[in-house]
Image: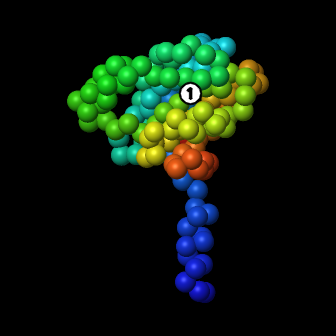
Amino acid sequence: MDGAEPTRLAFLVTHIVQIKKNVLNQMIQHSQAQAPLECCGLLSGQDEVISDLHTMSNRVKSPVRFEMDPLELLLLFKSLRAVGDTHLGIYHSHPSTEAYPSATDIEESFYPDCTYFIVSLKDPLSPQIRAFQIEDHKVRGVEMIELE
């Protein structure tokens, strides 16, 4: 085996995120409640396990874009620090498109250490959630492990 092989294999490893099942259900409920507009929020937890969902206001009230209020973000980050939680993810919905980051989602992904979740309501009877890492305009799928 030559020296290049381990480097090539490292790029094949899928990122994994652990998330509580109730958080996934809350994402779907928030998405459905805000449809046909995009919803958004932050995800937090401890020890790399996402256990809490924090709904945020979508300031632009758009069916194709979201923007969180900076004051809401500041207050939430202070609250997370106070209780020892870590910001681990960001979620938003795509009311009528696939669960894949749009060009705007990629351009406005400012947290490379977080996992981005997208809830698609394209098929309203079967919502889909997918997770991604977005860094330097590169999108990688993330495997979700659901915890009780």
Is residue 140 rendered to the left or right of residue 19? right
Query: Which residue is at the front of the view, 7 or 62?
Result: 62
Q: Is residue 58 above or below residue 81?
A: above
Residue shown at 49% from the left, 15% from the top: 59
Q: Quadrant of the N terminus?
A: bottom right
Which residue matches tag 1? 92
Residue 14: where, in percent of width, then height?
Answer: 58, 56
Residue shown at 54% from the left, 53% from the top: 15
Query: Which residue is at the front of the view, 138 or 123?
Result: 138
Is residue 97 rendered to the left or right of residue 32? right
Residue 121: where, in percent of width, then height?
Answer: 70, 24
Quick one: SS at disc 1? Answer: strand
Q: Disc 1 residue type?
A: His
Task: Using the rendered view, name the quadrant where residue 72 is placed.
Answer: top left
Q: Is residue 15 above or below residue 59?
A: below
Considering every residue shown, the one lying at the far left of the view is 82
Considering every residue shown, the one lying at the far bottom of the view is 1
Callout count: 1
Residue 133 appears in the rendering: no
Query: Which residue is at the front of the view, 134 or 6?
Result: 134
* Colour theme: rainbow
Residue 41 appears in the rendering: yes
Residue 30: where, in percent of width, then height?
Answer: 56, 18
Residue shown at 26% from the left, 27% from the top: 78
Is residue 44 rendered to the left or right of residue 78? right
Is residue 73 rendered to the left or right of residue 134? left
Residue shown at 59% from the left, 86% from the top: 2
Specify few, some or many for label 1: CA neighbours under 10 Å numbering under 14, 14-19, or 20 or more.
many
Residue 107: where, in percent of width, then height?
Answer: 56, 38
